[in-house]
Structures are given as C-alpha cells and as structure tokens.
Amino acid sequence: MSEVYSYHISDNDQEFIILLRGLIAVSEAIKGTPAKHGDWVLDAEGLLPKTVYHVSTVYYLSHGTKIPPLPADFLDPGSIQVLVRATLESVLVFHYVFAAPETDADRDLRYAMWCLSGLLNRQRYTPKSTWGKQRQQEDAELVKELRDKICCSNLFQKLTAKQQRKILTKGEWRLPERNSEGKCAFPSWVQIATAAGLSKKTAYEMYSHLSSYAHSSYLSVLQLRQAVTAKQREMLTGGTMGIVKIAMALMARLYTRVFPKAKSIMLDNEGFANTVDMWIDIGSDALEDEEIDWDAEFGDSFQGLE
C-alpha cells in the first residue's frame, strides 16, 4: 500500500481529454432548451453529466489514489473497472430510451417504463424520515400515473399479459424483442450495446469483463491479487481505458442525434469529430475481426496473471 505510484495512465492520452472536453461542450451547447416539468428532455440531458462525472473520476483514479494519513499511494484497477461499467450503462440507457426509438410514441413508452422502474425501486424502501415518507407517498401517485400512461400505449397493449406484469410490477424497463432464435425476450445489456453500434464480440467481451469486477467474480479477485507491482496494475487497466473512450465517443454521437443543436460542436471542432469517429469505429462491426484485448492478455512481464 505504501508503494509510490508514479506512472499516470492518462497523462499523455490526448484522445481521452479531447473526448471529455467535447462532451462538456456538447452539454453546454443545449443549455436553454425548453422543457417543462416531467418532460423527457430533462432526464435525457441528465444522463450526460452522469457520464461526464464517471469518466472524470476514472481519469482522476488513473493517476493513483493517495491517502496521506496512512500513508497510501496506489492504483485501484477494480474501482476503475466498476466506474467504466457504470459509464457504459449510462450511455446504453441513453441510446435505448432516447436515441433508438423511431417514433415519439415508442420513446414516450420507453421513457415512462424507465421512470416507473426507478420509482418502483424507491417504493420498496422503508423510509424513516418524515420527508422520506412524504416522498414515497408522492412517488406512489407518480407510479399510478405512469402505469396508466403505459397501459394506454398501443405498443404495450400488444405484449402478453406476463410481459405486461413484469413491466408494471417488477420494474422491467426494456421492451421484449424477437431474438436470433426467434423467441421474444427482454433485451440484455449486450444486445442493447450491439443495437447501439458495437460489434457483438466487442460488446460481449467488454461488458462481461467489466461486470466481473462489479459483481466480484473470482476472476476479478484473481487478477487484482496477482497484480502485485504498480506496472502490473497499470497493465490491468489498459484495455479499460479503451472501453471508456468508446463509451464517450458513442455518447457524443447519440447526444447530437437526440439534440441536433449540439451538432455545431462537432462541426466546429474537427479534432473532436475525428476522435469520436475513430473510437466508434474501434467498437463497431467494422473491426469485428480485429483482436482487441479488453481483459489484458499480458505479455511475458505479466506471466501468471490469468
């Protein structure tokens, strides 16, 4: 824990900084967009700062965690992996709820289902404060309104009774789709990532790797335990820094699709636009046959790390 950490992953990573600055500029570009209370625009906008906060913290952590009173100075690959998973999921929610729908009716249904899912989670809590109890009562009214709105949707009415119950009572926020086997099922995160433009191979490997850290799988513990030196921990995060740049680039592309006003940032900043295009290509079907090592197949310097 006392080993001095001196290697900074992102010091020379200009692409990371270009993408981060671009995302902030894109967010600023649509300030003042009219939106009334309860409008989807407010929550769609909210997913971008959430993404920016996550990737900014990833950048901060990539420079090492310092706790002077201990003293401690180390790189924390596990937290970086978990944050990048949260980043990717923020981007995929934005895609699924706001960018992917082809009609306003589809978007409104997905948005209502997403809101209902979150509020149902809070209904399951046991509030102790007066404010918390009041908030839960107010949420109950919103839950009723959302359920009524969802039930009026033609798209929802075409679902089976079992699928409808899962949405209305269990908080499922994804609409069932027919998969490659011809069965109708709720899409997975990997399927949403593929629909957003990532190759199937890239989406599966990225999400599986990040999830192993979020859920404390044996592999994540094994890798962290065997990454003894600072250099080994740096190598453990190498592929992850590529994942986060794919996520940032995808968010920029999707955001300018949903909010055309933000496209001016792309048009006025060729470096940002080119970096977005490059990292989207890296994660897309165009590189399906490329060997991209997301979970760090280390060379001789990392022998023994599985």
Image (tube, rainbow, N blue to C red):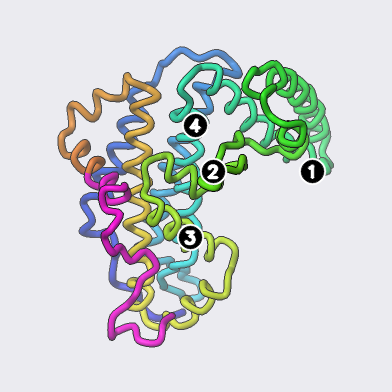
Amino acid type, label 3: Leu
For the C terminus, the quadrant is bottom left
N-terminal of the two: label 1 or label 4? Answer: 4
Q: Closer to the camera: disc 4 or disc 3? A: 3
Residue density around tag 1, few if under 14, some if 14–19, many if 20 or more, within 10 Å? few
Mark 4–mark 3 Cα distance, whole angstroms, equals: 23 Å
Q: Do tag 1 and tag 2 residues touch (Cβ < 8 Å)?
A: no
Q: Do tag 1 and tag 4 residues touch (Cβ < 8 Å)?
A: no
**Label 1 SS:** loop
In this image, 23 relative to 132: left or right?
left
Which residue corresponds to mark 4?
46
Amino acid type, label 1: Tyr
Q: Residue at left 49%, top 81%?
A: 225
Which residue corresponds to mark 2?
179
In this image, 240 relative to 115: left or right?
left
Q: Residue at left 23%, top 56%?
A: 13
Where does the image place residue 305, in percent across and percent down from the top left? Answer: 41, 82
Where does the image place residue 54, in percent across and percent down from the top left? Answer: 45, 48
Which residue corresponds to mark 3?
210
On screen, 42 above or below 63? above
